[in-house]
Amino acid sequence: MVIVKVPATTANIGPGYDSMGMALNLYNTFTFKRERKNVEDDNLILKSFNYFYDYFNLDLEEISIDVDENVPRSRGLGSSATCIVAGLMAANKFSGKNISKEEILKLATNIEGHPDNVAPAIYGGLITSVVNDRVYFSKDSVSDNLSFILLIPNFELSTELARQVVPKEVSIEDCVFNIARASLVSKALSKGDFNLLKGVNEDRIHEPYRRKLIEDFDEFEKLAKNNNAIINISGAGPSILITKEKNNKKINIEIDKKLQELVNWKALELLVDDFGAVEN
Ligand code: HSE
């Protein structure tokens, strides 16, 4: 039996489209057993498990999978990444191949298409990554001056649609706008420099297009601005990431009030997970 616990992740963090992501202390826990049991073929956990066996030309094994699921699906919180990472890590253990975390990251990126959720799901912390001849990345810890409120709606948004609305081309002006901001967002998060973060956390690549798909985004934006907090779309949405100084309790009170009106949403205050996926 192999048990794999994988954190939720929030990708992009404003200007870091498809490049930055952070692990959060909310987890899916997967139990794999070597036994014949029907798992549907389109199950992403099983597909990832089988991908590993195919990749290394191994004979497939019959397994059962149970999930203690806490990461909401299709909400921009990396639930697919938890499935991919868990499937690969379990296959690594069952097969005895014992490949490195870096190789797991490569396979996970092949399956997911981009590393911004799978990298922090594997390593924890705040990760900026680039896919080249392999995945190059750097991990930073996030300052504990900061905390995060995830606003999670009871409706889904398909990642496919959220990717379709992002323009295929951007102007040089918008590229420059995002490059410096992405680099400073990552520094501000690790230093815990909230004023720097507040000054630079803006995006011109995806958020202006995606926010229109998220009912109530404007309301939450007003609320964040009036209460010294920062708002971003979490991954491809529809969840919303609110970043605040940990001792700012006013925003929590205002969000609680707002949620009495906007009943389709719930709020979870989370911290960054610095460890990533663990298996035993
Ligand atoms: N970076 C991805 C996106 C995350 O924004 O579409 C969702 O997979």
Image (cartoon, rainbow, N blue to C red):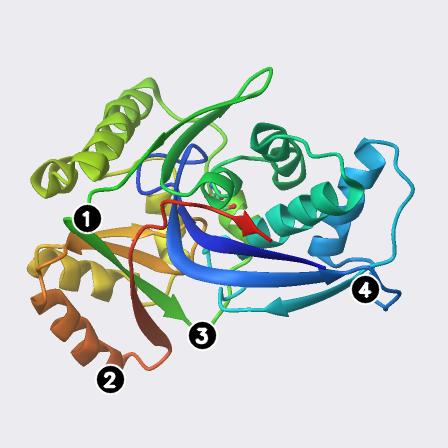
Looking at marks 4 and 2 on the same chain, the residue that comes earlier in the sequence is marked by: 4
Looking at marks 3 and 4 on the same chain, the residue that comes earlier in the sequence is marked by: 4
User: What residue appears at the point 69 percent right and 49 percent down from the top-left corner?
Assistant: 90
- The kind of secondary structure element at disc 2 is helix
Badge 3 vs badge 4, beta-carbon distance below 8 Å? no
- The kind of secondary structure element at disc 1 is loop
Looking at the picture, does residue 122 appear above or below residue 130? Answer: below
Distance from Cα at disc 4 to Cα at disc 2: 39 Å
Kind of residue at disc 1: Asp
Kind of residue at disc 3: Asn
Kind of residue at disc 4: Glu
Question: Can residue 68 be seen by looking at this rendering?
Answer: yes
How many numbered discs sit on the rendered protein?
4
Looking at the picture, does residue 243 appear above or below residue 64? Answer: above
Question: Can residue 74 be seen by looking at this rendering?
Answer: no
User: What residue appears at the point 47 percent right and 54 percent down from the top-left corner?
Assistant: 7
Q: Which residue in the protein does label 2 denote?
A: 260
Quadrant that contains the N terminus: bottom right
Q: Which mark is residue 40?
A: 4
Kind of residue at disc 2: Gln
- The kind of secondary structure element at disc 3 is loop
Distance from Cα at disc 4 to Cα at disc 1: 41 Å
